[in-house]
Amino acid sequence: MSSDQNSFPPVSLARLRVTAEADPGVLARVLERFQNLNVVPRRVVAECSAHNVLRIEVDVAGVADDRLTLIVGKVAQATSVLSAFWHWA
């Protein structure tokens, strides 16, 4: 059995990075944008700093640039969000 049989095809992994106020509902508002487009994130990490700033990272794979741009635009408009952008991980 060659190693090629067990390998997966390369997948573009995008990462959404959000900085927000430490509001209890902000994580749900960020993830809601993915749910609305029927996108399941591969990984979600949220961490609250000592300065009451919540940092959220959401990794998604196989999502087109235009959909990512739509998601980031909607997330950036959400209450308590200070900044939002995506990049290729």
Image (tube, grey):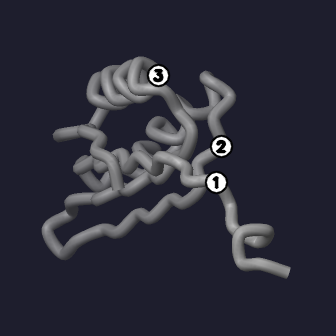
The quadrant the C terminus occupies is bottom left
Residue 26 placement (x, y as % from top left) = 41, 44
Task: Identify the mark nearer the N-term, 1 or 3.
Answer: 1
Which residue carries the number 1 mark? 9
User: What residue lies at 28% left-to-right and 45% top-to-bottom?
Assistant: 87
The amino acid type, in three-letter code, at marker 3 is Arg
Give the quarter of the image for residue 7.
bottom right
The amino acid type, in three-letter code, at marker 1 is Pro
Residue 67 is marked as 3
How many residues crowd mark 2 within 10 Å: few (<14), some (14–19), many (20+)? Answer: few
Residue 83 placement (x, y as % from top left) = 18, 39
How many residues crowd mark 3 within 10 Å: few (<14), some (14–19), many (20+)? Answer: few
Task: Identify the mark nearer the N-term, 2 or 3.
Answer: 2
Residue 76 is marked as none
Above or below, 41 relative to 74: below
1 or 2: mark nearer the eye: 1
Compute the Cα span from label 2 to label 3: 13 Å
Residue 40 is marked as 2
Using residue 83 as the reference point, say whether residue 54 is left or right of it.
right
Nearer to us in this view, 57 or 11:
11
Give the quarter of the image for residue 86.
top left
Secondary structure beneath disc 3?
helix
Compute the Cα span from label 1 to label 3: 21 Å
Residue 28 placement (x, y as % from top left) = 52, 43
User: What residue lies at 62% left-to-right and 23% top-to-bottom?
Assistant: 36
User: What residue lies at 30% left-to-right and 68% top-to-bottom?
Assistant: 48
The quadrant the N terminus occupies is bottom right
User: What residue lies at 18% left-to-right and 40% top-to-bottom?
Assistant: 82
